[in-house]
Image: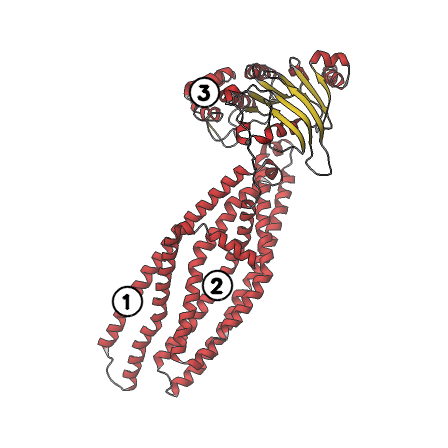
Amino acid sequence: MSRGLFTLRRLFRYIRPYRWSFFGALAATLISVVSNAIWPVIMGLAVTRIGVNVAAHAAIDLPYVAKVVVAMLANALVYQVTLFLSTYWMTIAVQRAMRDLRQDLSDKLNRLPVQFFDSHTQGNLLSRVTNDVDAITNALQQGVVQVVTSVIGISLAVVMMYSINWLMATIMLWMLPASFLISRFVVRRSQPYFQAQQNALGELNGTVQESFTGFTVIKLYGQERDAEKKFAGANHKLAAKGFNAAFISGMMSPLVGFTASLSYAAAATLGGLNVLAGRIPLGNLQAFVQYIWQVNQPLSTLTQLSAVFQSAAAATKRVFNILNEPEEKDTVTAKLPTTGAVRGRVEFKHVSFRYRENQPLIEDLNFVAEPGQTVAIVGPTGAGKTTMINLLLRFYDIDSGEILVDGVNIQDIARSALREQFGMVLQDAWLYRGSIADNIRFGRLDADEYEVVQAAKTANVDHFVRTLPNGYQMQINEDADNISQGQKQLLTIARAVIKNPPMMILDEATSSVDTRLELLLQRAMDRVMAHRTSFVIAHRLSTIRDADLILVMRHGQIIEQGNHDALLAANGFYARLYNSQFADADQLADESD
């Protein structure tokens, strides 16, 4: 309970900057509820006067009735205007507050470490930023005003009922605790299902995102049925959880309605007897029955909102779970020189790292990359090649040892400052929706058009770009599938060129292109690596023959290091790995013959 109240208080912190709109909406709501509460009294005056006239066989007092009608119209005008203002101001407060919440979520995601994204699917995170925030928005925008209206409306209706006849009011009030107990029982039973429903929705979004991302591969391997089954499973799970949540919470409305029906029956019987006995006027009975409706209708509204609030409660928990995640923290005690002054000497000294506490990966890793050297990292899958790069860029922090850049421990350098010194060309080229020029400029946002074109020429992509529709202003779509894989790779190289960093990291970018494009890519990468300390994760060993230093990794250890000729002469693991690639190629050639 205390945790729920803390979450609620934290949520309302986003409302605080817009409190004048929020409290203005509540004030307007209060006025509209008061107008609604006195409506039966005003109407009852006309009914009572008409009843008296009829009983006395006299003419209807039309001037009096006309005054009552005018009062009713004025009251109705006040009610409608304040109802509009209430909705308008609440919409302003909630929408702006949720805008801030979404912005905080976006900022938070940009500050989270890489390991967080390794353990959460993209679809699930997207669901939290969109669906969960929408659930909170709906609860606040639709629910808060209605809750305030209902609570105040019930309170005023009860007061007015007591002003008419205290005994009848006391008898009628049994429905309030009964409705409260029913609501409490149902909410306790249904809340876990609403939490499970939001989780299932996140899983479904993750499944959809995964399927659409791998759309081409699914088609290629004919796995449509498998993808359909996977989606059907996630969809069935969401439907089952949603049914349980809706069914249990849906029991609340008929149970509360049943108590209201009993109240109507009791009021009609007891009130009729009191009118016949002359204890209350006929108009007061009519007003009393309307007040029972003014109690029942808000109770019904609250029960209908139960599902909305329970979904919002589950969504709020999921959203704040992200906001509570620990961020990347920097204890900055040292600074690197400006980019132009960084030499690019990198040293790993007794570095150890493990993803899981009981599963060592890298143990006592040592090597030195001198400024301007090209360092190739080779080895079988799972040897730790990519992990080494992740440690160098502080996507993960080492368990022990030191990594030094120009003699400065990277643990003492702010991550952003460290990463500014590196450019990266990955095997999986990432481009975003926008123009080709903007994608190249992503490496340095203040670059002008001339610098963009020069970077493209250096990366051997200028010719390709000029043959495309609209050239550098061609829009790349969301999946970046309106240009070829080779063009993507050349654009990412141009992006690295325009950044002009002192150090480069290249995850073999030539492994998925044809021979001609491989030659263009290799030439472009040679230009990028010139006079820079470069780390190349190599899969095709023929591409790193000219590397100054080759690190051969296996099971997280550097088992051999040296240049290409020295490693071949040693006739060790590298030599076997290198010769096996050509042996495989010769074997394939023989089989094709």
Counting residues from the start of the chain, the first of labels 2 and 3 encountered is 2
**Is residue 294 positioned above or below 524 on the image?**
below
* Quarter of the rendering occupied by the C terminus: top right
Residue 557: which quarter of the image?
top right
Front of the two marks 1 and 3? 3
Element marked by disc 1: helix
Q: Please, which residue is most extreme toward the bottom here?
A: 277
Q: Residue furthest front?
A: 333
Residue at the image point whose x is 45% and y is 69% from the top: 296
The tag earlier along the polypeptide, 1 or 3, is: 1
Disc number lying in front (1 or 2): 2
Q: Dot 1, how many residues are within 10 Å of its Cα: few (below 14), some (14-19), or many (20+)?
A: few
State if disc 3 and disc 1 touch (CB < 8 Å): no
Which residue appears at 72% of the width and 25% of the height? 380
Relative vertical location of residue 454 with respect to residue 191 in this rendering, above or below:
above
Res 510 visible: no
Residue at 53 percent across and 38 percent down: it is 111
Of all residues, the one furthest to the left in this rendering is: 63
Between 416 and 160, the one lying in front of the other is: 416
- Label 2: which residue? 302
- Residue for badge 1: 73
Residue type, numbered disc 3: Val
Q: Position of residue 463 (x, y in %)?
A: 48, 16
Q: Residues within 10 Å of mark 2 (few under 14, many from 20)?
A: many
- Element at label 3: helix
Q: Residues under labels 1 and 3: Cα distance?
A: 69 Å
Does residue 52 appear in this view?
Answer: yes
* Residue at mark 3: 452
Tag 2 or tag 1, which sits nearer the N-term?
A: 1
